[in-house]
Amino acid sequence: MNAPLFNRVALIGIGLIGSSLARALKLHGLAGHIAISTRRAETLATAEKLDLGDSYDLDAASAVKDADLVIICTPMGAYEAVAKSIHDALKPGAIVSDVGSVKASAVRDIAPHLPQGVHLVPGHPIAGTEHSGPEAGYADLFPDHWCILTPGPDTQTEAVDKVAALWKACGAKVEIMTPEHHDRVLGITSHLPHLIAYTIVDTADQLEDDTKKEVIKFSASGFRDFTRIAASDPVMWRDVFLNNRDAVLEILGRFTEDLTAMQRAIRKGDGDALEEVFTRTRAIRRSIIDAKQHVPDIKPDGQDT
Amino acid sequence: MNAPLFNRVALIGIGLIGSSLARALKLHGLAGHIAISTRRAETLATAEKLDLGDSYDLDAASAVKDADLVIICTPMGAYEAVAKSIHDALKPGAIVSDVGSVKASAVRDIAPHLPQGVHLVPGHPIAGTEHSGPEAGYADLFPDHWCILTPGPDTQTEAVDKVAALWKACGAKVEIMTPEHHDRVLGITSHLPHLIAYTIVDTADQLEDDTKKEVIKFSASGFRDFTRIAASDPVMWRDVFLNNRDAVLEILGRFTEDLTAMQRAIRKGDGDALEEVFTRTRAIRRSIIDAKQHVPDIKPDGQDT
């Protein structure tokens, strides 16, 4: 086997993504040593029981000592505290990255607390499941998925290339863009859909009990897909909306405008307007399938009516 | 093999559901003769090429002649015209049913045009895919899915039992309720989610071209699931919203209230309110899985973030 890409990789936070990454690093022999750190002793014990790494520390600073690569995998709300806590322990030339769903705020919360000579290469693997925690991860989470990197204009190319190489070795496709552009695109493709799914499931949750029972019993696709999305990790998603507020509010504004127009069309019985929109939207589905975007192989009942 | 449940079954309309039903009737030997009628000569020719039935008529009246069971499988917008056109040809004691997604309007459009002695047993198999047309159907569409029947209080029990027996023989689970209750429940579990999916995909469709390309390229789950839902048959869904207007507008009103509250929480940076909702919504997902509702086996990437 070739020499590992990094001698020591420190993973701060070991939830779904962190634990999947640990498994992938091990599977592909990408790290000479995997140091795992997480705040909760119980989670750390689970990670050790699952044999996800080579060393385990409740103290992030100890984990990052001598690390060539540090990947922050905590909820984004903890980024600033984590960055401050590892500042003194980071070795010169070390690379710091993350896996958060919002990138501008990642730069905002981490960059100011890194010492000179440490390279920040924020990342976002667009992959996951509705399950959370170290047990939920698996080495095969990343193949065929995009991992977006958002380094600054002056970031050392070699550092960016090494992080890109790591994700490619895990099977991911890598794209580089600005944090702001990432946040706008993901605000549309992921954040708004999650907000809407959470909301509609909550709307159903507030129905009278008998109707609610029926809704659960006859849960047809549309809604059933939404419940899966709305089962995602609450803390992670809280942080997504707190940190990508402007992009989400902007696209949410456009969405509510469009929804109001649909509401009016229904109220007025304007079938032509409805049919026109419903016909237009078919094209985007085709584009996505043509773009060979990894589409889940959903059983036919995935589209109950 | 036992004697078929019906000597002659007429299917008016042969799209996804009609053609799936034709295949299932044949597979399980439920009809001595399957008469297929549809408005478009081209579609009828396709049905014949696929060998879906035993006889093929552009004229619905000819198809229903001597039929013991007539199932209207056209878009709901055609129900009244179909009912009028078959009135004189229906044999005494015949059963008329349908497969539409809205039941109160089905009764409204069909019942007044049926002769005395003909039994109306409206039905809605909660099954389908985002694909349309006779080629899209398959005999195995109904197993493990609910088929809801909404007969009137005075409908002959024997007629209801025979329609229920047919759907059970196709593998479906049968439930009986009032049309109004059906429309309210489906308005929440299916119609509103489809309206929202159509809307968000249309919102994305109206983005500037470069962003749109990126949205398609990086289409993460939430959104990707929505595009599948929003690829459903435009005419069928136009008719759903035209015919279930009140129930849809009522639940849409609740949804927009809740969405506005979420918007406010995001704008105010109220993380506690967001986390509370996101935590609550997890429970419904569990209830649905516990209710053994047939959940599509979505690959882990079905929940990208």
Image (tube, coloured by chain):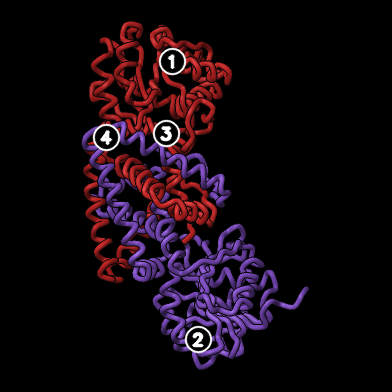
Chain colours: A purple, B red
- Residue shown at 51% from the left, 62% from the top: A126
Q: Quadrant of the image for the N terminus of chain B?
A: top right
The residue closer to the viewer here, A127 or B98, is A127
- The numbered dot on residue B244 is 4
- Badge 3 or badge 4: first in the primary sequence: 3
Crowd rating for badge 3 (residues with CA inside 10 Å; few <14, some 14–19, many 20+):
many
Q: Residue furthest bottom?
A: A88
Distance from disc 2 to disc 3, alpha carbons, whole Å, reads 54 Å
Q: Nearer the viewer, mark 3 or mark 4?
A: 3
**Rendered image quadrant of residue B124:** top left
Side of A46 relative to B88 (left or right): right
Distance from disc 3 to disc 1, alpha carbons, whole Å, reads 23 Å
**Residue denoted by label 1:** B10
Q: Nearer the viewer, mark 2 or mark 3?
A: 3
**Rendered image quadrant of residue A263:** top left
**Residue denoted by label 3:** B233
Crowd rating for badge 1 (residues with CA inside 10 Å; few <14, some 14–19, many 20+):
many
Crowd rating for badge 4 (residues with CA inside 10 Å; few <14, some 14–19, many 20+):
many
- Chain letter for mark 1: B
- Chain letter for mark 3: B
Q: Secondary structure at mark 2?
A: loop
Q: Is residue B34 above or below residue A34?
A: above
- The numbered dot on residue A25 is none
Crowd rating for badge 2 (residues with CA inside 10 Å; few <14, some 14–19, many 20+):
some
Q: Is residue B40 above or below residue A148?
A: above
Q: Nearer the viewer, mark 4 or mark 2?
A: 4
Residue B185 showing in the rendered view: yes
**Residue denoted by label 2:** A58
Distance from disc 1 to disc 2, alpha carbons, whole Å, reads 70 Å
Side of B49 relative to A222 (left or right): right
Q: Are marks 4 and 2 in contact (CB under 8 Å)?
A: no
